[in-house]
Amino acid sequence: MARLTFRGGVHPYDGKDLSKDKPMKTIIPKGDMVYPLSQHIGAPAVPMVKKGDRVLVGQKIADAGGFVSAPIYATVSGTVKAIGPRRVVTGDMVNSIIVDNDGLFEEVEYTSHNPEKLEKKEIIELIKEAGVVGMGGAGFPTHVKLSPKEPEKITYVIANCAECEPYLTSDYRRMIEEPQKLVDGLKIILRLFDNAQGVLAIEDNKPDCIELLSGLVANEERITVKALKTKYPQGAERQLIYAVTGREINSSMLPADAGCVVDNVDTIVAVYHAVAEGKPLMNRIVTVTGDAVNEPRNFYVKIGMNYNDLIEEAGGFKTEPQKVISGGPMMGFALFDLNVPTTKTASALLCLTKDEVSETEEGPCINCGRCVEVCPGRVVPSRLADMARRHDEEAFVANDGMECCECGCCSYICPAKRQLTQSIKSMRKTVLNNRKNKK
C-alpha cells in the first residue's frame, strides 16, 4: 500500500509507547463538574438551568447561542451549584455551569434511530442537537461543517485517523477498541453526500489499525483505507487533504472548497452515538502521559471532570513535572494550574519532567533554511518571525504569514532555538483581530 504524504514536516520523538498498548479505562467522577459555555468555535452556549436546579445525566443544560454554536449536556446527576466564571486550559476565565455531583448518575432516556431510515435534515438535526463538535482540537460545530452550500460537490469524506501529534494515542485506542463505531459513523456522514467516497486515512505507524479497518470495510463500496507516511503534521487538515486527494487549499478556503469534509476519529464516533443511539456528546478519550506520570494511559472521561482527577487516576506524579501541557507538545497549551475542567476538545494531558524550551536561549538566525525546508505551508518562517517582532503587519501579510498553520515544525528544527511559531502565531492573532474590528 502506497504511503501518501506532503512536502515538509518533521519526525519528532513520538512517545506513543508510553500509553498506546494499555486499554482505555473509564473514570467515575467524584467531585464537582464544571461545564464552560465556550467549548467550541462560535457563540457561547446559553444556560438553560439556574442555581439550585437538579439535573440528570444526558440533560441539556445549555443551548446553542447561534448557528455556529453547540449545546452542552450534564454528564452527572446533581444540583447546579453556581453559574459563573471558571478558568480553562487557555488561562481564560469562561462563564461556566458548576454541578454538585451526587454520585447517583441518574440518567435521562435516549431515543435510538435507524440511520438508513432518516432524511438528511434529520441526521443534521440530531448531530446539532447532540452538541457534537470537532474533537481533534478546533471545536468547530460539526453540524455546520456537514452543511456546506453545495453538498453535491463534496467528493471525499476523510476520517482523520493520522494522530500525528507526539504522545497522543486516544484515536489509536478508539480505532483498536471500537472500530465498528468509527465505520458506522463514517457511513452515517456519507449518507449526507451522495457523490462522496469515504477514506480512513491512517499513518503507517499503526499497521494493526490499517489491517483491522481494512477488513471491516472490505465489502463497503464507498469506504477505503489509505496509509499515510508517518510524519508530523500529517494530520493537519490542509496536509491531510493534499496527501489523500492531491488537492490544495489555503487560509482563505474551507475543505469544502476542495470538495472535502474532514473529521477526527472521536468526532465521527460522536456522530454515531448522536444519530444511531440518540446520545449527546458527554464523554471523550483523554491521553494522560509523559515521563512524569506513574501510569500513562488513555481514559474514558466524562466532560467536565477536573484535570487533577485524571492525574490521580494515572497514579499521580512520580516526580514533579517542570511542564504540563493540555494537548501534545507541538500544538498544546502549557498549564500553570491543573484545577481546570476537561472539555469537548481536551485530547491529552502531557506531563514532562524537563521544560527543555525554557532551559534554552535563543540565538541569532544563521540563515540555514531548515525552517523553510520543513514548513508544510511553504512560507519562510524566519523572515515572518522577524516581521512579527517588528510588528510589521503589512509585510507579514504580503509574505503569506496567514498561510502558517502554527504546527511548530520551524521552532522544532531551528538550530538557533528561535521561537518562530510563537512570534508568527501572535502576529496572526493581531491580523485576524484587526480584520474583525474593521468589519
Image: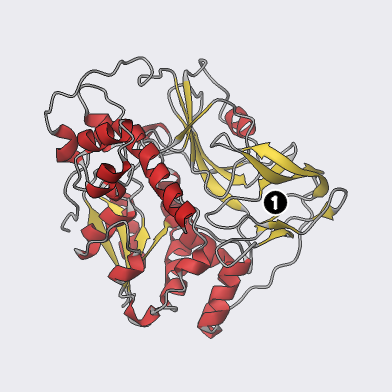
Horizontal and vertical percent for residue 181? Answer: 48, 63
Visible in this render: residue 232?
Answer: no
The residue drawn where x is 54% and y is 85% is 117
Q: Residue at x 85, y 53 (%)?
A: 54
Q: Quadrant of the N terminus?
A: bottom left
Q: Nearer the viewer, residue 188 or 422?
A: 422
Query: In the rendering, at what x and y percent does residue 57 appear?
Result: 74, 55
Q: Residue at x 60, y 51 (%)?
A: 283
Asked whether 425 or 414 is in front, the reply is 425
Q: Quadrant of residue 161?
A: bottom left
Colour pattern? secondary structure
Q: Is residue 140 left or right of residue 422?
A: right
Mark 1, residue position? 75
Mark 1 is surrounded, within 10 Å at the Cα level, by few (under 14), some (14 to 19) or many (20 or more) other residues, namely many
- Residue 205, by quadrant, is top left
Rendering coords of residue 431 (x, y %)? 38, 46
Question: In the shown orientation, is residue 320 left or right of residue 87?
Answer: left
Which residue occupies the foreground of this view, 115 or 405? 405
Left/right of residue 436 with respect to residue 252 in the rendered view: right
* Image label count: 1
Nearest the camera: 391 or 67? 391
Q: In the current view of this chain or complex, which residue is farthest to the right?
A: 52
- Residue 399 image point, x, y percent: 22, 46
The correct choice, above or below, for 48 with respect to 387 in the image is below
Residue 328 vs 5, above or below: the answer is above
Residue type at the position of mark 1: Thr
Quick check: can you spot residue 166?
yes
**Element type at marker 1?**
loop
Q: From the viewer's perspective, is residue 301 above or below residue 351?
A: below
In the image, taking residue 362 as reference, residue 132 lies left or right, namely right
